[in-house]
Image (cartoon, grey):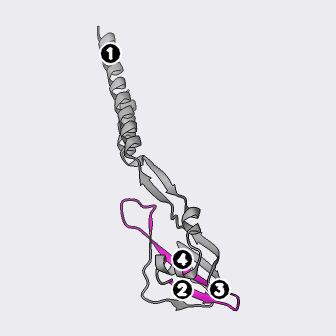
Amino acid sequence: MKKLIRSILILSIISLCGCTKIIYTHDEVLGRYKTRSDVEKTFGLPTEKKLSDTAEMWLYQYDRDDSFNRHSVTLHHNLQTITVDHFGTFNRYLIFSFDKKGNIARCDYTGVNLTVWKKDPWATAGLVAICVGVTIGAAAILAHDLTFWGD
């Protein structure tokens, strides 16, 4: 029974940070950008640029964020862009491909999630209340069982 109570307490603590909802999916965020200008305004200078006769590709490198959330990544800020024949090898990146008119033709990514989340305090409060209720109920049952078997 102690393991049950301990598990419920751990779930209660985890739930304090767990209630979020998606505002914009990754694809919806990427769908906002239509032109080279849109991308440059939002992301700044690319890490690397590759040019061809029919297209231009920009690679943005991302770094792992050192914050508490180990799954988040941050855009690597560049002071200048390097023009290359072949992109370098990065674990986390975002590549925009533009046609000759400067419109986005394609977007590729690895290890990057641009989903916009919003914390939902009401859901968190509800989940915590449920977990506290279950914990109190389990403690009451445990106390009742101990006094019943103790007589």
Counting residues from the start of the chain, the first of labels 4 and 2 encountered is 2
Front: mark 4 or 2: 2
Measuring 47% from the left and 50% from the top, which residue is drawn there?
21
- Which residue lies under the disc numbered 1? 144
Which residue type does callout 4 highlight?
Answer: Phe
Amino acid type of the residue tagged 2 in the rendering: Glu
Which is nearer the N-term, disc 3 or disc 2?
2
In what element is the residue under mark 2?
Answer: strand
Residue 27, compared with residue 82, is above or below; it is above
Q: Are marks 4 and 3 in contact (CB under 8 Å)?
A: no
The one nearer the camera, 49 or 102, is: 102
Disc 4 to disc 2, C-alpha distance: 11 Å
Q: Is residue 6 above or below residue 73?
A: above
Q: Secondary structure at mark 3?
A: loop
In magenta segment, residue 150: no
The answer to which of marks 1 and 4 sits earlier in the sequence is: 4
Between the residue at mark 3 and the residue at mark 2, the CA separation in whole angstroms equals: 20 Å
Quarter the N terminus occupies: top left
- Image coordinates of residue 11 in percent, x first then y, are 40, 40
Determine crowd level at label 2: few under 14, some 14-19, many 20+ residues with C-alpha closer than 10 A. Answer: many
Q: Which residues are the magenta region?
A: 46-73
* Gap in angstroms between the C-alphas marked 3 and 1: 75 Å
Q: Position of residue 99 (x, y in %)?
A: 66, 83
**Looking at the image, is mark 1 or mark 2 nearer the viewer?**
2
Q: Nearer the viewer, mark 3 or mark 1?
A: 3
Mark number, residue 90: 4
Residue position for label 3: 101
